[in-house]
Amino acid sequence: MAMVAGVGDAMQLLHLLAGVGTPANYNHWAALGNDQWSFEKCEPYFKKLENASSQPKAPYRGHDGPIHIRQDPSLNSVDKYIEEAAKDMNLPVRNDINNPNAPPEALFEIEHMITKTGHRNSAAVGYLPKSLVLKRQETLTICSGAVATRLQFNQDGTEATGVYILDRLTQKSTKECLVHAKREVIVSCGALFSPQFLMLSGIGPKEQIQHHKIPLVRDMSGVGATLNDHIAFSIAFQARLADSYIRLLNPLIAIWHLLLFIFTKTGIFSRSGARLCAFLSSENIDEKTMTLKPPKDASDEQRRRDPHLPENAPDLELLFINAAFDYERGKGYCGFQTCLVQPFSRGKVELASSDPLALPKFYSQFLSDPRDWAVARKAARFAMNYVETFRKSKYPFDSTWHIAPGVKRGSMEGSWKDVSDEEMDRFLRERLLNFYHPTSTCHMGLEEDGAVVGQDLKVHGFQNLRIADASVFPTVTSAHTTAPVYMVAERSADFIKNDWAKKESH
C-alpha cells in the first residue's frame, strides 16, 4: 500500500495518466440503478475539468478546464514496433484514448496530466493555485498536518454538526479540536480511509463499531465492503538500453535529462513513464491464437465497436512500460503491466482499533473469485504472445525474456503455447501487483441494496454528509481512476451549490 500526505492528492506520485474510460463503464453504473451517472450525465464534467491540448479541435473534449492534458512524442525506437505488432494481434491503433466514440478495444496513445512547463498537474496545481488561495484567504483554511478523527452529530443522528481534528504537527498536543459545520461536511479521505473515518464516527457495520467500543450512530453494512481494485502483473523482455528508462541509472544520462528539464522543459523528466496502452475484453481473445478474434459478421462488428454498451467495458489493460522489475545495470528492459481492470474479486476495509492514527485493516483479496484466475491466465498468455509477435518485427535488438511464466530468463526459450496452468498460477501468486486504484468502499446505490451513498453523494440517512472520492464508485472503472475522481468532485460541487441555492430561494 502506498500513501501520500500533502495537498494535491496521490497525483504527486502516480503515473499522471488521464484516462476517462469507455462510456460503457458509466452506463454500467446507470444500469445498476444510478441513472444520474450514465456517461451522458458525466461527460460534461469530464469536459469541464480538462484542457486537452493534445486534441485542440475535438468537439468532444474540453479546452478551458484547470487540468492540462497532453500527449508527448516518443523518445525511443521501441514504441513504433509495439504499434506494428498490435496490428498482428488484431488490435487497432488509436490516437485519442478519451474519444467517447472510439471502439473500446485498441492500442491507444496515452494522455497525461502535465502542464506546459512539464510539471505535474495535480489537483493542487489545477484547482488550488497560489493566486486562488490568496484571493480566498478570508474564507479558506487549510490545516496541514491535521487529522480528522470523527464527526459530531445532532441529537437524533441525522445531521453532521462538526468535525473533530487532531494536530499531528504538535507532538505534545493530544487534545481534539472541534470545527463546527454550518452547512455540510464532505468526506474525501479516499477509498481506503473514508470508510475508516465513517466507522470511527459510528457509521458502519454494527459488529465492528461495537467491538471497538465506538458509540453506534447508524448501522451500515456497506461501509468498507466491496473494495474494488485493479490487479496487475508484469510480462517483461530485454530491450536496447537506449529504449529503456533503466538508462537513467547512468549518472551522466540522468544529469543530461535533468538539465534538459530545467532549461528547456523537455526530456524524460518532463513526462510520465508510459506512452502506450491497450484495452480489450478477455472474452474476445481467441484461445488458440492468443490474438483478438475477428468479428463473426457485420452485426457482431457493430456490437463490439459500440463503446456505450455496458457489456463492452474492457476487462483487460496492457500498459507498456519502458522499464521492468529485477533489472541489471547496463541492460535495458520493457514490458507490459498486464491488468485485470474489471475483476470479480472484492476486498474490504475494517477497523484495526478506535485510534484514528492507526491504519485500518485492508483485505485486498485479489483473485479470491475463481473467475479472475481464468481471466488472468488468458491475459498473461495474450501479453506473452504480444512480446513474441513484437520479437518478429524489425526492431534492431535480439530481445529475450525477462519476466514471464514458464520461460528461461535471458533467452527466448518458452512460449505462451508451452506454459501450463500450474506454472501460470505459481507465477501469478509470486508476481501479483497492486495497481493503486482502490474504489467502491462506500459505494453508490440504493440503501436497501447495502449502498452507502445516494446519487447525490449524500450518506443514506444524513441530511448534510456527503462523500466525494473513489469510494463512491459503484464499481471500478476500466480506466485509471484519477480523471473519474475529478469528475466525481466536480459533480459533488454542483450538487452542493444546487441544493443550497434551492434552500436559499425558499
Image: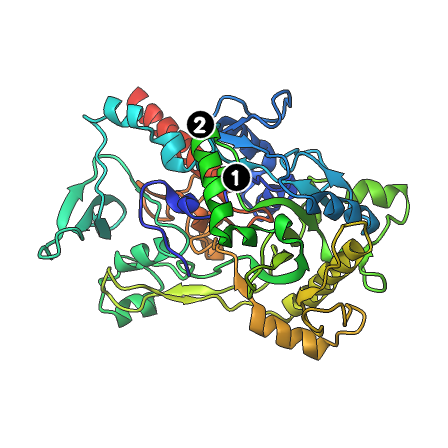
The colour scheme used here is rainbow
What residue sits 26% from the left and 56% below the top? 201
Quote the CA–CA distance across marks 2 and 1: 18 Å
Which amino acid, by three-letter code, is at mark 1? Arg
What residue sits 33% from the left and 28% below the top? 129
Residue 58 spot, x, y in % from top left? 64, 23
Query: Please, is residue 99 above or below residue 432 in the view?
Result: above
Q: Look at the image and tell me in which quarter the C terminus lies.
A: top left
Q: Classify mark 1: helix, strand or loop.
A: loop
Mark 1 sits on what residue? 271
What residue sits 38% from the left and 48% below the top? 460
Q: Classify mark 2: helix, strand or loop.
A: loop
Q: Is residue 455 visible?
A: no
Residue 79 lies in what quarter of the image?
top right
Q: Residue furthest front?
A: 252
502 to the left or right of 478: left
Please tell me which residue lies in front, 439 or 461.
439
Q: Look at the image and tell me in which quarter the N terminus lies.
A: bottom left
Q: Is residue 159 visible?
A: yes
What residue sits 74% from the left and 58% below the top? 387
Residue 484 spot, x, y in % from top left? 51, 41
Mark 2 sits on what residue? 66
Given this view, does label 2 or label 1 mark the residue nearer the observer? 1
Query: What numbered label is drawn on residue 482?
Result: none
Q: Residues within 10 Å of mark 1 (few under 14, many from 20)?
A: many
Q: Earlier in the sequence, mark 2 or mark 1?
A: 2
